[in-house]
């Protein structure tokens, strides 16, 4: 039974921990002396951590590979404000020794309800061509099963089982709201783009043991895969308007929004531009939410560095919390005594009356 998860790092800083992890990546690098060391990324369902093994490396190098499970003993500390693990010992685990649910994060939402939400939106389409197209994808059992389980990304956002569906449902809701404010937007076209914009992730990513890229995904990317999937479905609809096909294709290939982010084309009509910005917004809001969740145990409002957003983050809810002021025993006593006395009136301070407990005032002769 796995007891230590990476979300618990804040409680174990500068301590030796023993736990099991999946190997997300493995590299053998040279030290300055020329001797090898292991540079790993280890993961569980709550996150990932950089890990280094400096000693006895020769004995460990060939005992495991990426996607294997390891039992690890090592020192947990921070380097450049990020947790890292210095490995002292490791051992490869067999599948019978682990519970797969400990290593792949999964949405806490009901998958069936999310899928039904999508179906309800699609049922409201007015355009029969777009409605039939999306329903054909949803009725395909292999696509539907993968769509309900795939992550939306490897690490950047919605990187968990069910993440793709969770992301698209959130995006549908945002698109629907924005269409009410911008009535010139073709709602059915925008929602079709939202449904298809990441559907290629079901073939781009593998998520049996850890999240990584398939060979097809690495070589082609999800947008090329999506164009292939779209054409395969459109072959069933010979009367699908060619102009509408071009618009759907452009929604797919332009949704990253910028050339440097992998878009072969920039968004060139309103629905494409809106899809890009709402997709970008949803992914960044989820990245922030997940980062705050991972660092919930930190005391201050500032988080560590968020690599996907290239900045540390301020948890505004924590920042606005009113913490009770520190109260000392003396101030408690003073407050208790003064609470029974009336407030002093403005003006010059008068001498206090002598009480049995107090020392009498010294009277000096004139």
Image (spheres, rainbow, N blue to C red):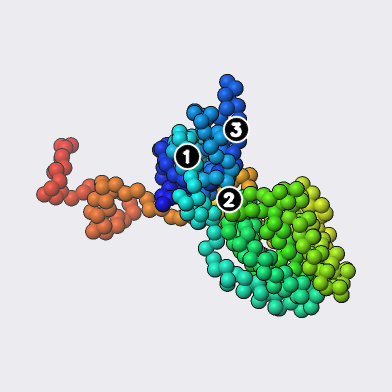
Q: Is residue 166 visible?
A: yes
Query: Horizontal and vertical percent for residue 94?
Result: 49, 47
Q: Is residue 304 visible?
A: no
Q: Earlier in the sequence, mark 2 or mark 3?
A: 3
Residue that label 1 marks = 91
Q: Are marks 2 and 3 in contact (CB under 8 Å)?
A: no
Residue that label 3 marks = 28
Q: Separation of disc 3 and disc 1 at Cα?
A: 17 Å
Q: Is residue 73 above or below residue 189?
A: above
Q: Earlier in the sequence, mark 1 or mark 2?
A: 1
Farthest residue, direction top: 33
Q: Which mark is residue 210?
A: 2
Query: Horizontal and vertical percent for residue 159?
Result: 60, 54
The local secondary structure at tag 2 comes to loop
Mark 3 surroundings: few (<14), some (14-19) or many (≥20) residues within 10 A: some
Q: Separation of disc 2 and disc 3 at Cα?
A: 20 Å
- Residue at the image position 60 percent from the left and 36 percent from the top: 27
Q: In the image, is 163 to the left or to the right of 233?
A: left
- Residue at the image position 14 percent from the left and 43 percent from the top: 359
Query: Horizontal and vertical percent for residue 32?
Result: 59, 22
Task: Pick the residue in front: 44 or 90.
Answer: 90
Q: Separation of disc 1 and disc 2 at Cα?
A: 18 Å
Q: Which mark is residue 107?
A: none
Farthest residue, direction left: 356
Q: Earlier in the sequence, mark 3 or mark 1?
A: 3
Q: In the image, is 357 to the left or to the right of 222?
A: left
- Residue at the image position 75 percent from the left and 65 percent from the top: 193
Query: Horizontal and vertical percent for residue 297?
Result: 45, 50
The local secondary structure at tag 3 comes to strand
Mark 1 surroundings: few (<14), some (14-19) or many (≥20) residues within 10 A: some
- Residue at the image position 34 percent from the left and 54 percent from the top: 346
The local secondary structure at tag 1 comes to strand
């Amino acid at each position: 039974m796995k007891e230590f998860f990476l979300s618990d790092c804040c409680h174990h800083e500068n301590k030796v921990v023993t736990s099991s992890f999946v190997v997300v990546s493995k590299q053998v690098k040279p030290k300055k002396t020329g001797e090898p060391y292991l540079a790993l990324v280890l993961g569980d369902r709550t996150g990932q951590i950089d890990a280094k093994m400096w000693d006895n490396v020769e004995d460990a190098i060939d005992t495991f590979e990426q996607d294997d499970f390891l039992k690890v003993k090592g020192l947990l500390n921070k380097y450049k404000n990020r947790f890292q693990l210095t490995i002292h010992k490791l051992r490869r685990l067999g599948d019978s020794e682990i519970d797969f649910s400990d290593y792949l994060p999964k949405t806490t939402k009901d998958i069936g309800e999310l899928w039904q939400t999508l179906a309800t939106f699609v049922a409201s389409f007015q355009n029969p061509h777009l409605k039939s197209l999306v329903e054909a994808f949803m009725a395909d059992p292999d696509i539907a099963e993968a769509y309900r389980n795939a992550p939306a990304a490897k690490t950047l956002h919605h990187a968990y089982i069910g993440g793709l569906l969770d992301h698209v449902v959130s995006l549908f809701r945002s698109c629907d709201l924005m269409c009410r404010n911008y009535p010139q937007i073709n709602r059915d076209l925008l929602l079709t783009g939202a449904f298809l914009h990441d559907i290629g992730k079901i073939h781009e990513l593998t998520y049996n043991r850890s999240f990584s890229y398939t060979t097809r995904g690495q070589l082609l990317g999800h947008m090329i895969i999506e164009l292939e999937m779209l054409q395969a479905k459109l072959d069933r609809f010979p009367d699908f308007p060619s102009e509408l096909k071009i618009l759907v294709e452009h929604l797919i290939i332009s949704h990253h929004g910028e050339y440097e982010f992998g878009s072969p084309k920039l968004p060139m009509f309103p629905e494409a531009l809106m899809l890009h910005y709402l997709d970008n917004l949803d992914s960044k809001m989820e990245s922030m939410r997940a980062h705050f969740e991972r660092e919930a145990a930190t005391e201050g409002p500032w988080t560590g560095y968020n690599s996907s957003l290239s900045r540390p983050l301020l948890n505004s809810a924590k920042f606005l919390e009113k913490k009770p002021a520190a109260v000392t025993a003396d101030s408690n006593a003073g407050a208790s005594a003064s609470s029974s006395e009336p407030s002093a009136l403005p003006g010059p301070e008068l001498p206090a009356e002598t009480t049995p407990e107090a020392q009498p005032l010294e009277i000096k002769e004139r």
